[in-house]
Amino acid sequence: QVQLVESGGGLVQPGGSLRLSCAVSGGTFEIYDMGWFRQAPGKERAFVAALNWSNGIRYYSDSVKGRFTISRDNAKKTVYLQMNNLKPEDTAVYYCAAGRRHRGSYYSPDRYDDWGRGTQVTVSS
């Protein structure tokens, strides 16, 4: 059974930075596509970033492109989301996701099989 645990969330001022981590246990991390999604109060879960397992291609939503960076460390079985120049509209619960079937759009939650429980990010002065 694959388990994902996010960490690194918190309260940060606008313009600040945070790095989220997602530790994965179980399964074969090296062949998983990894993604980050977020959900703000009253809104649907939205795509943030994804990383292909084999070619390293990264995908970003337009709202975070140029500010966020997704990366992974296969030796540590961990995926990261470096978030810079944070804005109040980035406030949300951030979820890590792992995709084992390699089918569907990277931007859709349907591509991903396993999910973490989320970590809260609040951007406020």
Image (spheres, rainbow, N blue to C red):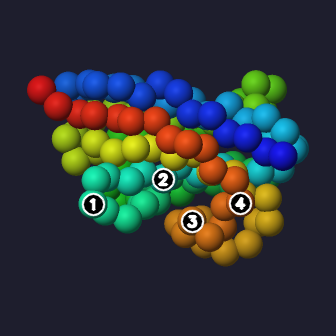
Instruction: Quote the CA–CA distance across marks 4 and 3.
Output: 8 Å
Q: Quadrant of the C terminus?
A: top left
- Asked which secondary structure carries label 4, the reply is loop
Using the image as rendered, state which of residue 34 and residue 69 is in the foreground: 34
CA neighbours of label 2 inside 10 A, class few (<14), some (14 to 19), many (20+): many
Q: Nearer the viewer, mark 3 or mark 1?
A: 1
Q: Amino acid at mark 4?
A: Asp
What crowding class fits label 1: few (fewer than 14 Cα within 10 Å), some (14-19), or many (20 or more)? Answer: few
Q: Earlier in the sequence, mark 1 or mark 4?
A: 1
Circle nearer the N terminus (1, 2): 2
User: Where residue 28 sits: x, y (%)?
Assistant: 87, 44
Which label's residue is closer to the chain start, 2 or 3?
2
Q: Earlier in the sequence, mark 3 or mark 1?
A: 1
Q: Label 4, on which residue?
A: 113
**Closer to viewer: mark 1 or mark 4:** 1
Residue 72 visible, this orientation: no
Q: Which disc number belongs to residue 37? A: 2
Is mark 1 in CB contact (under 8 Å) with mark 4?
no
Q: Residue at x 63, y 34 (%)?
A: 5
Residue 47, given in percent of the width and then of the height, sits at 46, 59
Q: CA distance from mark 1 to mark 2?
A: 15 Å
In the rendered structure, which amino acid carries the disc numbered 1? Gly
- Which residue is the site of mark 1? 42
* Kind of residue at disc 2: Phe
For the residues bearing labels 4 and 2, Cβ distance under 8 angstroms = no
Please report the residue visible at 76 percent of the width from the left and 25 percent of the height from the top: 76
Badge number at residue 109: 3
Residue reaching furthest to the left: 125
Q: Are marks 4 and 3 in contact (CB under 8 Å)?
A: no
Against 31, residue 72 (above or below) is above
- SS category of the residue bearing label 2: strand
Separation of residues labelled 1 and 4 (CA atoms): 24 Å
